[in-house]
Image (cartoon, helix red, strand yellow):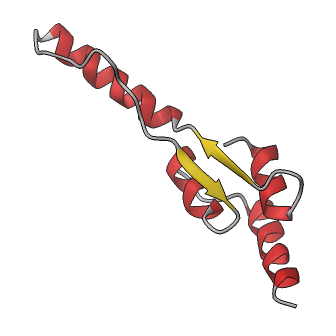
Amino acid sequence: LEYNIAMSIAAGGSVKAVSAQCPYDQGQAIALSAAKALLGERIPSYISVEPVFTDKYNLAKSWNKVHKENLPADIRDALNRSFTKENK
């Protein structure tokens, strides 16, 4: 979930929704599997992390899940403006 994509979603631009990857969670899953393999434990042949469907209604929550931090203020402001326009 890149900044420019999130801003487009928030501002009502051309991007309406994405399936965002979770690189932190992916790295954590791979590291855990590597540690288990080194300990001689059985690991799955395929490791995946479920992507996050993201649209303007869950953008803040998705950003937090993907980046492990709050939505940047300028994206949050654009999102709030978008909702204000929608409710008029």
- Work out which quarter of the rendered image holds the C terminus and state it: bottom right
Task: Report the residue at 18% width, 8% height from top.
Answer: 38
Q: Residue farthest to the left?
A: 40
Q: Is residue 42 left or right of residue 22?
A: left
Task: Report the residue at 86% width, 63% height from top.
Answer: 11
Q: Is residue 84 left or right of residue 56?
A: right
Task: Please name whichever residue, 82 or 73, is drawn nearer the observer in this view of the structure.
Answer: 82
User: Looking at the rendering, which quadrant does residue 27 occupy?
Assistant: top left
Task: Report the residue at 70% width, 64% height from top.
Answer: 56
Task: Report the residue at 55% width, 55% height from top.
Answer: 64
Q: Position of residue 8 (x, y in %)?
A: 84, 54
Q: Is residue 50 left or right of residue 38?
A: right
On screen, residue 44 above or below 11 = above
Q: Position of residue 1 (x, y in %)?
A: 66, 43
On screen, residue 12 above or below 21 = below
User: Looking at the rendering, which quadrant does residue 20 occupy?
Assistant: top right
Q: Position of residue 79 (x, y in %)?
A: 77, 69
